[in-house]
Image: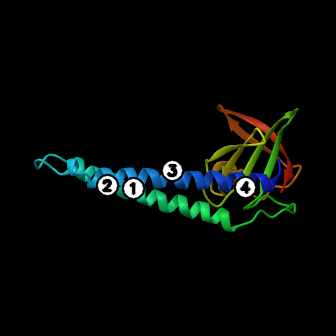
Amino acid sequence: MDKTKAHDAITLALLQRFETAKWAAKQAHDAAINEESVAENKYDTFGLEASYLAHGQSQRVLECQADWQLFEKKQAVLFGDDLVGLWCLVTLSRVGDSESEKYYFISPCAGGLSLEVDDKPLYLVTLSSPVGKLLTGKSVGDSVDLLQGGVKLPYEIINIE
């Protein structure tokens, strides 16, 4: 997997997430100011709930925008790194199964996001995530045990970009 392609795909996915969040915030705002949201009695909380939702969606828009802009401004560095750290694309191969590769991008944000690049799954992990902590500071040739379905499976780091 090419790091530049991965970075571009992540940036696009974050932009799409930002656009979706803006749409959802607009819908929530419209519901909050709709005349049907006006309370009919003291027990009618629909308008209050709609305003809380609109506020939450607005916060989500800001977070999604910050994530996208972070990737948009930071260009992919193309030289290989010696150790896994922030902004690295890490390729793992399952020990004994060279066909089973996993791709992780060590990201400062949007941990848990997964997407397809060249028909291969790419996972974003942050430094504070369990996988991020496991990979940080490792180098090519090091092995790590990933927990999958309650079972630890051995992988080897075969590439760091």
Q: Is residue 135 visible?
A: no
Q: CA distance from mark 1 to mark 3?
A: 14 Å
Q: Where is residue 136 drawn, in percent x and y? A: 74, 57
Left or right of 71: which side holds 62? left
Disc 2 and disc 4 in contact, CB within 8 angstroms: no
Q: Which residue is mark 4?
A: 8
Q: Secondary structure at mark 2?
A: helix
Q: CA distance from mark 2 to mark 4?
A: 34 Å
Q: Which residue is mark 1?
A: 56
Disc 2 and disc 1 in contact, CB within 8 angstroms: yes
Q: Is residue 108 above or below residue 156?
A: below
Q: Amino acid at mark 1?
A: Gly
Q: Secondary structure at mark 4?
A: helix
Disc 1 and disc 4 in contact, CB within 8 angstroms: no
Q: Which residue is mark 3?
A: 20
Q: Amino acid at mark 4?
A: Asp
Q: Secondary structure at mark 3?
A: helix
Q: CA distance from mark 2 to mark 1?
A: 6 Å
Disc 2 and disc 3 in contact, CB within 8 angstroms: no
Q: Amino acid at mark 3?
A: Thr
Q: Secondary structure at mark 1?
A: helix
Q: Which mark is residue 52?
A: 2
151 and 107: which is toward the camera: 107
At 29% from the left edge and 53% from the top edge, which residue is drawn? 32
